[in-house]
Structure formats: C-alpha cells, structure tokens
Image (tube, grey):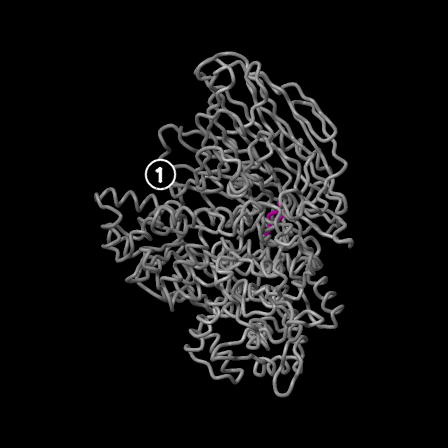
Amino acid sequence: MNPWVLRYEGFDPASEGRREALCTLGNGRFATRGATPEAGPERTPGTYLAGCYDRLESEVAGRTVSNEDMVNLPDWLPLTFATPGSAWFRPGGARLPEYRQDLDLRHGLLLRELRWQDGAGRVTLVRQRRLVSMADPFLAAMETTFVAENWSGPLRVRAGIDGDVANRGVARYRSLRGDHLTDQAAGAGDGLTWLTATTRTSRVAVALASRIDAPTGPGEATAGAAEVHTDHVLDLVQGEPVTLTKVVALVSSRDAGVDDPRAAALRRAARAPGFGVLMREHVEAWQRLWLRARLDVDGPQVSQIVHLHVFHVLQTLSPHTAALDVGVPARGLHGEAYRGHVFWDELFVLPWMNLRFPEVSLGLLRYRWRRLPQARKAAREAGREGAMFPWQSGSDGREETQTLHLNPESGRWLPDNSHLQRHVGLAVAYNVWHHHLATGSMPPWAAELLLDIARFFASLCVRVGDRYEIHGVMGPDEYHDAYPGASSPGLDNNAYTNVMTAWLLLRARETARLAPALAPPAEELARWDDIARRMRVDFHDGVISQFTGYAALLELDWSRYSRVRRLDRALEADGDDVNRYKASKQADTLMLFYLLTADELLEILRGLGYPADHGLIMRTIAYYLERTSHGSTLSAVVHAWVLARYDRSSSWLFFTEALLSDIEDVQGGTTAEGIHLGAMGGTLDLLQRCYLGLEVGRGELRLDPLLPDQLGLLSMSIRYRGSQIFIDADHRRARVNGVESRVFTEEKPIMTRTSDLGRRLVHHRERLGLSREQVAERAEMSAGYLGYLEESAEPPSSGVLYRLAEALQTTVDDLLGSDVDRPPGRGPAMAHPTLEVLQEEECLRLISPGGVGRVAFSGSHGPTVLPVNYKVREGAIVFRTAPHGPMDEDLRTGLEGVEIKVGFEVDRIDEARHEGWSVLVQGAAHHVPPEEAGDLAEAGISPWAGGARLLYIRILPTQITGRRIHGL
C-alpha cells in the first residue's frame, strides 16, 4: 500500500458517490468532486465555490420553508469520446478490461487509466490527469491521452461545460428546490468556450471559460441555452499516444477586483499556461503545503489515511482561504449535505490549523467577526446581550437551521429545534483563545468577538438561590431537545454549556487585560466573576449529569437497538421519543474532557464549589460511554480522546473508527454527500494534542506523550509563536528539535540563509561518508529532525547549529555560508550560466512571502537606497519607517495628489549553487493615513532596526520586472 496514493480498481456504480467525495480536488477557493467526465446515472457532479450560497423556498408538509444552500455550479468536467460507429463512451455498461483511479495525495492529482473495448473489438487505452490548481486558485485542468492499442483511425472527442445543473446530491433534500442557477448563457470565440449563470436570489454571477489544447486545434464549437461544447476528431495511429488538454477558469462576482466575471474568466483561460506548466506549479504549491503540514506516523494504512485527512482539510481550508469571507463548512467543499453550512466543526479543525497555518485560522475567525453585527441583532431579538451566533451559518450569519427535518425511516417531517444549540458560540470563543495561545496574538477585533460572546452567555445566566442557571438550550448530544411531554423545547443546565460558560468568563477576564480599551465596566466584570464561581452543575450516581432532570430518564433497552446509530430516527419511526431515555447521539458531557485538560476541568469545578477528583472523570466517562450510540463521526474522535489515558485499547478502536469514518463510510451512505471535515481535522488534532500530549500554554509548549501501542513513532512540524519546531516521539521519549525534551519556550532562531543550510548539511555529511543516523547520534538529536533540517527552509537554534558543526567537523560559520559580515556572492560564476527574464506573476510569487527589500529614491542628499522589512498586502509593498525621519521627509512632495516614484528591489543569492534572482518594483510611494494603519498592523511588519517606526508607507506597483541566473 502506497501511503500517498488512494487507489480504486474497477468501476463500481454503487460506490461511485463515495469515490467522488473522497477524490474531490480543491484549492480552498473552489473544489470539484471526483466524478467521471462522461455522462451516466451513477454520476453526481459538483463544483462548489467557497462562500457561494443561494436561498430558495419550498413547500413541505403544507408549510413554506426557506433554505440556503452552497450552490452546485456549472460542471466543467464533461469530456467523452467515441470510436468509429460507436456511441459516446460511458463507463457504466462499457466493456472495461482495465479501470483504475488513483488519488495522488502528495501532488494533488486525480489519475485515471482505463482500457475500453468497443463493440467491434477495438481496444483504446485512456489516461487522464486532473487538477484544481493550488498555485492559481482560479484554474483547473484535465489532460487526456488516447492510445489505440489494436487499431488506427479517427476518434471523436467532445468536451464541454454544462450549466443545466442543480443541487441534487442529497436524496433526502430532493423534494426541496435545488434549481439555484438561472440566466444561463453560453458561447464560443477566439478558441475559447464560455458559460455564465447567476444564482436566483443572492445574484452571484459565475463564469467558466475553457480552452482546449489539441493537435487538431480548438475544435468546432456548439452553444446551447445552458451548455457549450467543442467537437474534435483525433487521428489515432496504433500504439502512438495523442493528448488533448482542457484548461478551465472559474470566476465569480464575489472575487475581488472583478467587474465582469465572463471577461475575467476568458482572460484567465486564454493566458493560462499549458498542462505541463500548470501541473509543475501546482505540484510545487502542494510541496510547500506538505512541508508545513508534515505529520508522519508508522504503518502504511494509518499513514495513508492521515495523509488523506490532511489533504482534504487543506483542499477546503488552504492559504487561499485566508483572504476569503468563508467559514469551516461541515462537509467541506465536497458535497451538499448540511447545505454547505458552517456549524461548530471549526472547534475540531482550527487547533490543528493554528500550529501550521495560523493565517488561515485567523481568516476563518474573521468570518465570525464579520457576522458579529448579525449575532448582536439575534441576541437582542432573543432578549439577550452580546452576540448569539447561529447553530447553522451561511452567507450573512443569520440562523440557517431548518425548522423541519425529514426522518427517512418514517417518512415524516418533524420539528427541528437544533437552533437551541447555543454552545456554538462557546466553540467560537474557544478558537479565539487557542489561536491566541498558539500565536501570542490577540487582535482587537478578536478580543471584541470573545468578549461579546462572553456577554451573551452571561446574559443567559439567571440567579436561582445561590447558583446561576442557564435554561432552554440543547447540548451537543442533539438527541435531547426537550423534557418528556414538555410543551416547549429546551433543557436546563446542560453541563457542557454551563461549565464552558464558566471557562469562557474566566478567559474573558484575561482578554480584557490583553485589550484594555475593550474591557467591560467593573460591575459587569464583577458579575462575570460571580457567575464563574456560582454556576450550577448537576450530579447523579457519582457522575456529572448531562442536564437537570437527566437522572429521572428511563434506561433504554440497548439490546433492541444495539447496531442503531441514529436512535432518534429509529425510535420516532416506532412511535417513541428519544427524549425519554438516557441515550446520546454523541459526546455531550464528555466534550468537557475533550476541550479541557483534567486539571483545567477539576480546577473549574472546585472553583464552583463542587468536590471533584480524577475518579469523577473516570466514572463519568464510563457512564456515558455505555449510553452513546455514536450517531456522528465526531463521536469516535471525542471518545478516542477521552479514553486515551484511561483505556488505551478502546481509545485506539475509536481512533481507528474515526480514521475509517469516510474512507469506509461507517455511517452508512453519508460520505457520498460530502466528507466529514470535523472528524478529519479531529483525527489530526488527536494525534498531536492527545496522543502526543501537546499542551499549548502561555509562552511554552509541554509534551506528555502516551502513544498507543499500535503507533511506534509520531513526528511532525509545527509553528508556535513564530518559531518552527520539529517534534518526534516514541514510547520511550519525546524530542523537540531533535533533543530529548518535554518543554519548549519561545526562542529566537539564529539568522541564517536557511535554503543553503540543508545543502551544506548534506554536503558535509556525504564528505565524511556518514548516514543521517550517524550524524544525528553525534549531534545528540533524532535522525528525523536532521532529515527535516536537510529538507526544509526553517532556521534551527544556535545550540543545534553548534552541535551539528561539531558532528560534521566544520564550523557554524561554514554551515551558515562563511562569514556573515562579508557581502554575498564573492565566488566565481557557474560554468554555463543562463540569464532568464521573469514574468510578472513569477516576480510576485518570489517576493510575496515578505522579508527585507531595498527602497531606492532621490533623497535630499542625493540618490539613496535603504533596506526595509516589508510585506505584500493586496498587491502593494508595505513597510514601516519613523515619522519625520529621512524616508518620511524625502518621500513627501508637499503637493496634493503628487507622489514620488521609487524603486523597490528584492533579491536572493544562493552561494551554494552560484544562482540567484532579483525583482525590481517601480511605483509611487504613498503615506498610509492613520485611519488605515490599524488594518496594516495585522500584517505583522516588524522592522529589525526597532524603535518607534509607526509610519506605514505603501508602494503601488506600476511596473514589475525580474531576472534569474541559473544553470542549464
């Protein structure tokens, strides 16, 4: 088994839906299901643009209901072929001597190879490679190669875009309207085809443009009302491959800087490079992602599924997502279940993202902050203060939870009260706080978000006697939405909600200290403190009660429902009600042990005045474990976590179920409707924070690993408060940056030309004829960490460098590239240098990470060049300088609307290879007004020179050029 390839042999119509979901390709902006390009009834195509929703009304059970869906956009995949005298190829019913589909996780490619024998006995080999570009988030492409194995002659090929699509991917939704697209139009010209459509109510305009690269040219185009295609005839010669490529651009009116989506899509499709370049750039982008997302475990099957989960998390939430106004869709961009809505799944995903892609996590938290006004409005309408976030969120932050849901077992439409799951706000606040712990950052808007959520939960609390209570809510369990026989929904004192409210109010007090300008009045803080000391929590039989009155519920006859995961549906179909029983769909009370360490939880309970010890935790886990049906993929994640230190074998069984939840569809048919993103992110976080015992604290990381017996070695790379850290652990010890340790505190890495360091380490190791293991032993570090240093561009600490220098019989200066006080590039040129002129896109890619550049301008004392630390923001160069300093004064004209044109240069010199590049940006320098400086503060521009450099200057490029020197 290849840990980087998910392979399917043969064509199986019955499992095609699951394959489509698992073989989805995406880039964080849009994704396309792994459907076959050819038509067929087993096919459920879907292309989804992050954040693109539309609302329709439907008649259900005599009522009009409104539902907002993530829209299924026009299908760009269609491509089929036919041999002389045969019908268009469809895999269903075709004679296929060979059919194989591979999802290449490392490179982000979907590969298909088939051999088709037509009715005349002609055998044609077809190979396809498909990508949704991670390098250019507007592009997708598919390359198809045909080989006539035992014949020669013409092969007809038809490639198109289909706009006659609807949301039909979930069977139980099909009685509801899904015809979200209207105003379709299609056409062709200049070797391109295009199709446009508009969503019915949200009025999002979408355009797709396609270019066909074929030996016979662009083909003959035919456009219909909602479809466009081109026909091609390829002359095949037996045994000789012929390739046709389809390149597609997808643009919408939601995209920044787009006035005409159709024109923009046509431009992008026309300018896109060929498939070879597209794939190379796409693969390089994935290589950069995998370097940051590295997570290695023993065993090919576990490793394959871990890679699969990382892959799908990053396809949904990539660095491209950071700048978008989108949340964490529960089923990814992979299908239509849950209508593409945002629930609380970010609670399971962001802790993993925080330590690898903190900028993406921050962007996802901004989705919540942008909807803070709507959440405040919802709180006011409910008679509360602060911000009340919806259980299901979509485009604008209103409550999207359906009022009715269908029980497919009884066929009845039933009231849906899940909007009472107010705890979703606790998840948002938890993520704000843990992003702060991982990054050390608490932007004012993030503090505002947490404090307003705290204000809402404090307003939910009512004083009853000497305790505070919360009434009329639902917990994470989801089975229990009311008391038996009650006339209105809601439960009192859900333990998870109450305890996490106490936790939140304690964190709110700390947040107020971090953002004193936003601190609540003293009397409000005093009430919060009082609630955090007097919140009610119920107990029965020596365990924490899920809610007030739980102890009075009936015990369920589990023998009758032993294999039933959705007890609510089964009992309702039998004329019963799950509210009557001590039965949970998924972890509820046990979520406390998932989010809080044992010490944190016990401290909160004791602070509330309740006697609590570790025995309480063990009893509570055992009690609810016996009463849970695991009707959610998240249940296995949480139970694997809470059992990790009490029942390791059971923990591994639940972890295995969580790993297999989508790849084996353990919930019975749900994966075809979209992967379970929370469960995927949860398994990754379980490996790092639970099994590795990684505790992210204030200014330090702590490790307390307890690996399952089935895992021999666990290693990963994380980023903590700006420091890149490599961690590996086995059953005997844990190592941080190669050295045995269980604590990491913030440190500043030594400055080094890091891309050269790896090559120098390899050079000296090979010079001495040593293996990685031998050098690692000499340097007192793990071989895994040495391999990481050789392959990555992250700077190690000075201590690591000195030990490596001694092990390799050289000096630190030599490892760093000799004397750091001399100018770079003194060595001779390479034997056959090549000077390459760089395109503007490549120039922008090279300088986009930010760093040190040089500003050139005509100063008061003549030509001046000064180095600055810079970042690229929205296409502009931004840096900081001191008010009234030389750069401030010399870059002002004193005339309104007249700016000084400057040059800005960035370069990179690779002394190891005698290569390098240089990029020159020319444009006007603008002083950023104070009212805009707050937004730029989040860019994290930190001048090395220090001092009060509070003035921001922005260079708006008018010309960007660059050159690269490299070998042949």
**Quarter of the image with the C terminus in it:** top left
Q: Position of residue 131 (x, y in %)?
A: 53, 36
Q: How many marks?
A: 1
Q: Which residue is mark 1?
A: 827
Among the 4 quarters of the image, the one containing residue 608? bottom right
Q: Which residues are magenta?
A: 874-878
* Residue at x 71% of width, y 70% of height: 488
Q: Position of residue 449 (x, y in %)?
A: 64, 66
* Residue at x 61% of width, y 44% of height: 902
Above or below: residue 468 compared with residue 732: below
Can residue 912 be spotted in the picture?
Answer: yes
Residue found at the far bottom of this picture: 465
Q: Position of residue 145 (x, y in %)?
A: 49, 24
Q: 151 or 441: nearer the eye?
A: 151
As helix, strand or loop, the secondary structure at mark 1 comes to loop
**Quarter of the image with the N terminus in it:** top left
Among the 4 quarters of the image, the one containing residue 415? bottom right
Q: Position of residue 875 (x, y in %)?
A: 62, 45
Q: Amino acid at mark 1?
A: Gly
Q: 697 or 62: nearer the eye?
A: 62
Name the dominant secondary structure of the magenta segment.
strand
Above or below: residue 364 compared with residue 77: below
